[in-house]
Image (cartoon, rainbow, N blue to C red):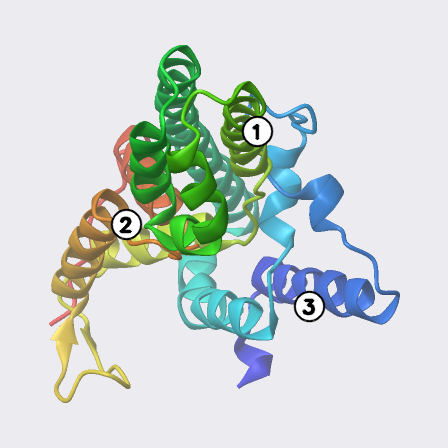
Amino acid sequence: MFNNLTPIVRNLLIINALIYFIGSFINMDMTAIFGLRNVNAETFKPYQLVTYMFLHGDLGHLFSNMFGLFMFGSMLERIWGPNRFLFFYFFTGVGAGVLYLGINYYESYKLAQAINIYSQHPSPESFVGFINKYTGGSGAIQLGSFLEKFRANPTDASLINETVMAVKSFYNSQINIPMVGASGAIFGILMAFGYLFPNTEMMLLFFPFPIKAKYFVTFYGLYELYAGIQRSQGDNVAHFAHLGGMLFAIILLKYWGTERNKFY
């Protein structure tokens, strides 16, 4: 089975696995340096648009991405050749990072606006409203005793200053959350597979009957769009990065003018 792997796919699998296990072995937090940060963060560096693709949060994250590369990558590399496939991999991976940064920048801009509004008109009610909106209410529970004190003394300058510092600290923590993983490139590969082989039937572990690649890719893309827009509190999946990989895959495939092969 592994003998059927193409050179670029095999090398990418090895590199990703080595980086993960070496980082775990030497107990080095590579994410702190090489994870993709918000452009407003002091730790943001342009090279992170590439390096984030080779980092993974845990073994399950690594396995799921490498499994997708293993399943679909070699077929595309055989069609395109190693150079074009490698370009496609980085183009979709970097493109996913660019879209993620754009969405993340917009979200952080809206958060910064909310913080400015609160700083100008601080009150217990607006503080609770901010916490409920941006932390899903979990922060309000943790600050129960403080909120009681703030409600009892709403004009206390020290308490007001503490809340302003708290919302600004929350902003800094949000823009410094890194994104890692090859998911953007893997979703690009998945999109290319569905585009080139739309009628190939796939058997999935979580699906009881065969499904054509074009339907699987469409449903998966719609799910990622929904999950990105309706993101629940605690959801740490970069859904728009996945969509970015798919979007940039279509852009490149259209640019290449690739002929679609249909398998029934």
Q: CA distance from mark 1 to mark 3?
A: 44 Å
Q: Which residue is mark 1?
A: 162
Q: Around disc 2, counting alpha carbons within 10 Å, would you say few (fewer than 14), some (14 to 19), or many (20 or more)?
A: some
Q: Quadrant of the C terminus?
A: bottom left
Question: Is 258 displayed left or right of 172 in the figure?
Answer: left
From the viewer's perspective, is residue 6 above or below residue 60? Answer: above
Question: Is 213 displayed left or right of 159 in the figure?
Answer: left
Sequence order check, earlier mark of 2 and 3: 3
Query: What x and y, as percent, mark residue 139?
Result: 43, 49
* Residue that appears at 50% across and 29% down: 163
The disc placed on residue 240 is none
Q: Which residue is mark 2?
A: 231
Judged from the image, the secondary structure of the residue bearing numbered disc 3 is helix
Of residue 136 and residue 86, the one placed in the foreground of this image is 136
The single residue placed furthest to the bottom in the displayed view is: 208
Judged from the image, the secondary structure of the residue bearing numbered disc 2 is loop
* Residue that appears at 58% across and 48% down: 53
From the viewer's perspective, is residue 84 above or below residue 38? Answer: below
* Residue that appears at 69% across and 67% down: 14
